[in-house]
Amino acid sequence: MTIKAYIVRGISDLVAACPYTIVGKKILRNKESIKDKYRPIATQQEQQILQRVKLGRNIALIGVFCPFFWIALFSGASRDFVYFNAMHSGIVIAVGYVILIKGRIDLVRYKKTKRNQEPERFRTGDVLRPLTVGAKKPIKEVDCADL
């Protein structure tokens, strides 16, 4: 993934974390969806990496919704004071994005190494051939990507 893809993914994560977006999704979605039923179980290390990604997202959200900046902006404070709070919020947002992007990169690397450690026959794209008892040719070839 390129840096642009990570930035776009980070922005989409921030939008997905917006309370209005969450409420809207809950209204539009049934309580029990098919996607939730078949979600793969993450390993403990994957869960730790995902927690870091969420931490970065939450830090960035704190920067976006910083009350000091919004109070200074709407109360008519001096321009320098608003700039100071805007820079402070921007730094907090940047730190959150750095943690979020670092977590995403770690997650992609972990999944690649995890995939490389799987047995050869379980990798996506490999073809499994069933046992042929008394048949001259295999009955059906099964592609792991279809499973």
Image (cartoon, helix red, strand yellow):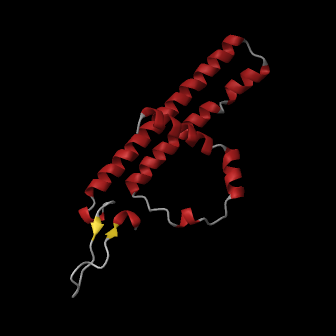
Q: Residue at x 70, y 12 (%)?
A: 79
Instruction: Give the residue drawn at x 58%, y 22%.
Output: 88
In percent of width and height, residue 141 lies at 31, 72
Q: Is residue 111 left or right of residue 89?
A: left
Q: Is residue 129 above or below residue 92?
A: below
Seen in the picture, residue 124 relative to 110 is either above or below; the reply is below
**For the point 56% across and 37% down, which residue is it?**
11
In this view, 3 is above or below 77: below
- Please, which residue is most extreme toward the right here? 75
Nearer-the-camera pick, 94 or 37: 37
Q: Is residue 125 left or right of residue 1?
A: left
Residue plotted at (72% across, 21% down): 72
Where residue 94 sits: x, y (%)? 52, 28
Q: Position of residue 115 (x, y in %)?
A: 31, 55
- The residue most toward the front is 136
The image quadrant where one finds the N terminus is top left
Q: Find residue 74 and report its horizontal and vertical position in percent.
A: 77, 23
Closer to the camera, 124 or 138?
138
